[in-house]
Amino acid sequence: MGASTDHALGRSTNFYVKDEAAFKDGFGTTAQVEFAAGERVEFVSSSMEFNIERIDRMDQKQTRSITQDRVTGKQTIAWSFEANLGSARNDGTAPNLDSFFKAATGGTFGSNTYALTSVNDLPSLRLMREANGVFSEVIYGAWVEEMTISASGGDIPKVSFSGGGCHYALTGTSSVASSSTDTVNVTAGEGHNFMVGSLVTVSNQTDSTVRAISTDALTITGSSSMTGTVVPKVPTPGSITNIINNGLQGSFSLDGVTSYPITSFDLTLTNGIKVIEDEALAEGATDFIAGYRTVSGSVSVRAKKSDLLALTRRLTYSGGSNR
């Protein structure tokens, strides 16, 4: 019989999203900023990507092997998230995906809408994905570059978000080899299972954030008598609220007409994020600026003669010219 608790099962993956009270709050500081059970969101698919550029050194050398010497360059972070739009509601209660919608639109929930705002400062997020307690990934200072809402036929409408972030922390597991106040030494060679920003739990201690790493020594907040295991700190998943299960509820209005027989539609909002990532001596992105926002989309309808008048009016639409 296999040890299922040793495997990061896709079906056991949880995703958490939290509004950042301050940009990148909790990263590399003594203040412990965690995720709550109620910040778990349902999803269809997700990804978190962390890449570090490796630059070939073009020094004078007595070899033709360019890749013999390389320098660590900038890091880049990207993420994506897709969920059923059944996570939204129409009863005046903010949806379970409220944080994502706010970060995408810059607005807040009210009267069942998220009004687009002209603010230049979009909210930032902290994201976490964990699987079966085997590992966790946390992104600090995350932003939403793109949001897409789509539906087709009898399929459940979907909403997707994607963007980047400033700091990434992958967290694995290990055991305590020894400890001193605010320092825990893990099993030799396993310090690489943690990164600055890792949220961890030590068996007999309160939860903490890894603030620094030196080989196998992790700087956290703890006593001199830490023992047991060092594992990812994840909340016990609670029930997800504000969910509706009727995936076919909703309406579509085009020029005030709601009777069109729609076969599919999609709407994409792009924030035009300008990433601040060109600063010297910085490991990667340090901030972001909201750029020009664009909203685009398409709709497919089953045309009837009674609907053609409204459809052809787009050629002379008074709000602008498409010629």
Image (cartoon, rainbow, N blue to C red):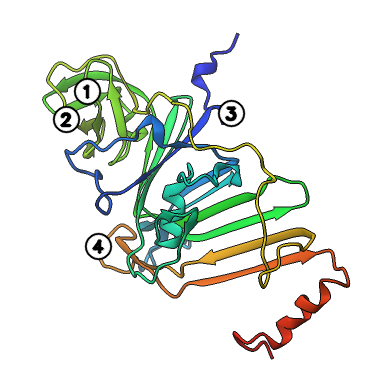
| Residue at (85% x, 71% y) in the render | 306
| Residue at (14% x, 29% y) in the render | 182
Q: Secondary structure at mark 3?
A: helix
* Mark 1, other Cα within 10 Å: few <14 / some 14–19 / many ≥20: few
Up-down relation of residue 25 to residue 198 (above or below): below
Where residue 217 sits: x, y (%)? 22, 31
Q: Quadrant of residue 67?
A: bottom left
Q: Quadrant of residue 185?
A: top left
Disc 3 versus disc 2: nearer the observer: 3
Q: Which mark is residue 18?
A: none
| Residue at (16% x, 30% y) in the render | 221
- Of the two numbered discs 1 and 2 on the same chain, state the one appearing first in sequence: 1
- Mark-to-mark CA distance, 4 and 3: 40 Å
Q: Are marks 3 and 1 in contact (CB under 8 Å)?
A: no
Q: Which residue is mark 2?
A: 221
Identity of the amino acid at label 2?
A: Thr
Q: Secondary structure at mark 1?
A: loop
* The C terminus: image quadrant: bottom right
Q: Quadrant of residue 300?
A: bottom right
Extreme-bottom residue of the structure: 323
- Of the two numbered discs 3 and 2 on the same chain, state the one appearing first in sequence: 3
Q: Which mark is residue 11?
A: 3
Identity of the amino acid at label 3?
A: Arg
Q: Which residue is mark 1?
A: 206
Disc 4 versus disc 1: nearer the observer: 1
- Mark-to-mark CA distance, 3 and 1: 28 Å
Q: Which mark is residue 281?
A: 4
Disc 2 versus disc 4: nearer the observer: 2
- Of the two numbered discs 4 and 1 on the same chain, state the one appearing first in sequence: 1
Q: Secondary structure at mark 4?
A: loop
Disc 4 versus disc 3: nearer the observer: 3
Instruction: Give the mark count.
Output: 4
